Image (cartoon, grey):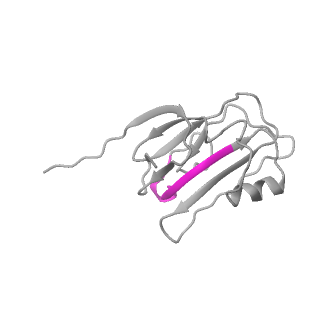
Amino acid sequence: MCLSSLTVSFADTGDLSGKVFTFPEKGSTAYVRLTPSSTKILYSATFCLRLRMFVNWIHSVKKSLKAGGSIAGTSIILGQHQGSYGERFESSQAFVGQIKDVHMWDHVISTCAIKSYMQGLVHSHGNNLSWTKLGFSIHGQVLLED
């Protein structure tokens, strides 16, 4: 018996309430590309998501916008870390776990709003990315599960 792994690409837009993206194993080809609802240049933004790790290690990269900087024409990638634009993905830096409730606002939201989001309480949906109306494409071995 011969088993092979195929890289599959799937794109959709829809309400992902109650669903999660699952990244079951490390690999350099598994990621989800998010499509913002707006193409305008952002000078400030807030990006929130919920993670569920499968293992007890966490690779976390915190990035911030420099004063006077902007975000425009950027692809938002989940499941992989890219050190700089155009760099290839590496298996050693891949995320393993689940991601859900992704939202992005085109402005900085209050600390109270972020706490409410993190506690699973009522929060406003992102106006640039919203889990309830998300454009996305799945690449490689990523599952969309209930």
Question: Measuring 70% from the left and 61% from the top, which residue is drawn there?
Answer: 119
The number of discs equals: 0
48 vs 118: above or below: above
Relative to 141, 58 lies left or right: right
**Residue 58 figure quarter:** bottom right
**Residue 95 is at least partly visible in this image:** no
Relative to 138, 34 lies left or right: right
**Residue 76 figure quarter:** top right
44 vs 135: above or below: below
Task: Residue 109: give x, y in percent of width and height.
Answer: 81, 48
Question: Measuring 74% from the left and 44% from the top, which residue is drawn there?
Answer: 124
Task: Residue 35: give x, y in percent of width and height.
Answer: 60, 33
- Judge whether residue 98 is colored magenta: yes
14 vs 77: above or below: above
Residue ranking furthest to the top: 39
56 vs 75: above or below: below
The stretch in magenta equals: 89-103
Question: Measuring 61% from the left and 35% from the top, which residue is drawn there?
Answer: 133
Nearest the camera: 46 or 127? 127
Relative to 128, 94 lies left or right: left
- Judge whether residue 5 is colored magenta: no
**Residue 42 is at least partly visible in this image:** yes
Task: Residue 129: give x, y in percent of width and height.
Answer: 66, 38
Nearest the camera: 44 or 116? 116
Nearest the camera: 19 or 99? 19
